[in-house]
Structures are given as C-alpha cells and as structure tokens.
Image: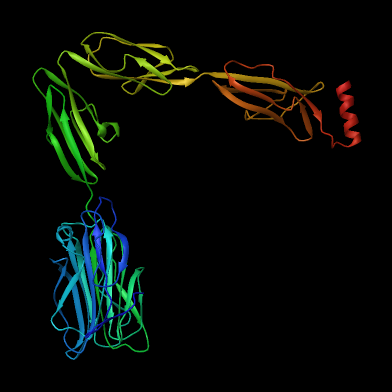
Amino acid sequence: MLSAAANAGVGSFVGSAVIFSQSWVTQVEIVGSWTSGLTHAEEAGSNRALIFFIHAEHNAVIDINSVTYGGQPMTLAVKHNAGTSSAQAYVAAYILDESGIAAATGDTFVPVWTTTPLEYSYASVFLSNVNQAAPVGVTDSNGTASATPNPIATNPLSTNFGDMVIAVATAGFSGDYTLNNGFSEGYENDMATSVGAAGYKSATGADETPSVTHTGDYLNRQVIIGFVVQVAELTHTLTTSSTAGGSVDTPGEGDFDYDHGTEVNLVALPDANYHFFRWTGTAADAGKITDIYSQGSSVLMDADYTAIANFAVDGTWNVIATAGANGSVDPNGVITVAEGNDLMFDAEPNVGYVVDTWYLDGNSVQTGGDTYTLYSIAANHTVHVTFESLQFTISGTITCGSLDMNDVNMVGLGVLTDANGFYTATVGYGWTGVVTPVKYSYTFDPSSISYSNVTADHTNQDYDALPADDFNDNRRSAMWRLIID
C-alpha cells in the first residue's frame, strides 16, 4: 500500500508511473516496482511505454487537461468520473511511447487539472515487451454515484496471449480495495477520505473482466477503468543469399522480417548452364526448411535464420558426405563430381568403434564395411556413415560344490545366471566396472571382480557359492554333505 503524502495548499497526494519495454518475447511483464509521487526515474531498455495513473475526489466536476513526462506530452488511454456536479470520483490513465521516453529531458510528471481537486493521488510501474505500434488495445470504464454496484466491473475485454490487462479504480470514501477475477494488486493509495487502487493480470487470449470490491464503513460513489496493454508482436529476420550460378527469387535476397511462426516460401532460380543443388544456412541446420533439396521450398520462422541457395554447373553433381559421432569419412563435405563418375568413401572409426551403417539420401544401403562406393553418379546425393562401439563378452559359471547356481544376480552386468549356473553379458569398448554376484543366503568367492578399460572378451569368470553363516546347523550340515559328495 502506498502512503498518502501532504501536498501543501491543495490537499494530499501520492504518485507512481508505469514504463514498458519490448524485447521480442511473448508476454508483457512488470519491470521494477510501482512508484509513488510525481517522479519516476527512467528504466533502462528499448521499445518502452510509460503509463501514469490518476485518482481524485472533488466537490465539483473533475478532469485533467494534459500530462507531460520530462516535457513530453502523454496520451490519454482511458478515464471515467462519476457522481454529481457537486461531488465526483475520478480515475484516468495516460501513456507515453518509446520515442517520447527517449526524448524526455527529465523524470517528472506534470499533470494539469481543469480545477485542482480536493484529493488526488498518482501511481506508476514499469512493464516490458509492449507493442509500440499499438500499445493500448481494448478499453472500458464504469462508474456509480451510489454504494452499488459493489463489486464494480467493466465489460469483458478481449485479449491476445501475452497481453496484460490493467484495472484501476477510485472510491469516494476511505476503505480497502480487493482486486477480483484473478487480478494481482499493483498498489493501493489511501487519501484523506478516499482510496484508489490498480491491479494487473497476464492474458492468455480469453476475455478478462476488470473488477474491484470496496470494503469500508461507507461508500458513496466509485469509478473503474480497464484497458489491455498489448504484447509486442514477435518478428524474426530471414537473411537470404546464393552461391554463383543463380539467385533467390522468392522472397529475394537480403534481410526480410516476418512475424513469429510465419511459413515463408523459398524459390531458387538457377542461371543458364547451372542447376539448383540445395539450401544451406542456419535455417537448414535447424531443420526449419521443408525440403533442403527442392528449389521451391519453405522455412518456418521461429527465430532469426539464414538461407543460402547453392547451385552447380550443369554436367556436374554434388555429393555431401558426413560422418556420425566416433569416426570420420573421406572425402567429406561437398564433393563435386562429373556426371557418370564413381565416388568411393573411406570410413575411419575412432579407437574402440566400428562402422555401423552407410546411408544414401537418408536410406540404409550397407551394414558395416570401411568403404562404400557410389556408382555412375547422375544426381545430387548425400552419404552418411554411422559408428557403433566394439562389444566384448564377460561370461562365467557359478557353482556350489557340484550344484549349478541359477538366478544369481550379477550386479554390474544386469544379468542372472541360467539353470546351468552360466551368465554372459556384453560391454562396450573401454568399459570399467565391478561385477558382484548376489543371491540370498549365499556368499561368493571371489566376492566381486573389478574390470578396467575392457578391450577384449573375458571368459571363465567363475565364482564359488557358499552357504551364508546364518544357516541353521541342520541346513549347514546338509549343504556341506552335498559339497563333499
């Protein structure tokens, strides 16, 4: 709650202002705090807007002629007064856009009243991500010259996702205000015999209804205004260019701005004796181009992207060779090949890996093998090779005397022994770990086996099982007789 302050000679007041900043995100947000008084230091940022709230109570008609901030004129967003010609409540909101804030030479508000009211207060707060072309959307207001209705509300206000809805009210008598319909309180200004308050709510695209409830010993009149602060439209830049041999026909070449989520057509136009090869750039890298091998494609604009049209001389074709993790391929990158020629690729796995699969134009064409040959090339292609880790076996048998121990949990390998007491598991190249056999009521010799940097099979990793010490004497004697026999 903001406290009232004495205004020498004319009554009491408190004050605050709202500044908004746009940073290409999808929601209007509060920046800083609500501030009382007729000064509000400019917040850092760009594409801002500044809102100034006014509350008043007077024994005659109330109105504001103008408001400036740092010498810059502010624009009325919405206002309302209610009562009689001899007693009125008043509320208003003014706004200043980024250009006005940038041109301001100070941080002081100067409201000019038609007649200075007996009581008044001011309020303000900073927001970010406001639409500069149209910062204020739908507005509405309501007022009553009596104690009813209470709660008091405006009509529902239409919103878009990311907007912020503001509710501001003044009551002609002291008390407290409660914001309704999910609005959060921004401030409450207590004047000598009246009260003003404002709240806000982030919009999801549904209609929102500003509403307040006054609580106090008495209520004679009140007014409410509501307005939508519109979120900045997201825009992204597409930068298009081309290699030698053609151009980008649609949308052209250069920088182009689009709303977030726009699907932009891409059309590449080859010169004589050239043909289109593929689209590259950050849009292709991000998978945002529908078909990178089609000269007529499209890109989804959900960030800033580049799109480059690549061309090749007729009679030649381009093959793009890439390798997955844990290996390489030679040649790699873009290889230009004369039509009808063959091209052989050599894969070099990293230590501990082997070739897994060769892919041509995204389709599996060969399993394993360190070389792959593309014959009689007559089109553009992609070749990709993947690698897999070498696999090694750790295996052995667990017995208890002459008995095979089944269902022993080989912790570390994730397997159980079978009916013959045998276990086997595969581990990757360089595997390091500890294998510990576990079964209720048994101990094992050895209790575990440690492995470090496995690079070969480990067979005959056997264990002896022994009855645990907590067996009773009869069971222990019977078990040892089985072992001795």
Q: Is residue 25 above or below residue 445?
A: below
x and y, in percent, of residue 314 in the image: 14, 15
- Compared to residue 217, the image places residue 223 above or below, namely above
Residue 290 seen in this snapshot: no
Residue ranking furthest to the top: 341
Residue 301 at least partly seen: yes
Quarter of the figure that contains the C terminus: top right
Give coordinates of residue 193: x percent, y percent: 30, 87
- Give the residue drawn at x 13%, y 66%: 71
User: As displayed, is residue 438 above or below residue 193?
Assistant: above
Total labels: the figure holds: 0
Q: Nearer the viewer, residue 52 or 435?
A: 52
Q: Quadrant of the N terminus?
A: bottom left
Q: Quadrant of residue 49?
A: bottom left
Q: Position of residue 113 (x, y in %)?
A: 15, 79
* Residue beneath the point at 21% across and 84% down: 82
Q: Report the residue at 59% width, 25% height from top.
A: 432
- Does 405 sit left or right of 319 as displayed? right
Residue 271 rendering spot, x and y as whole percentages: 9, 22
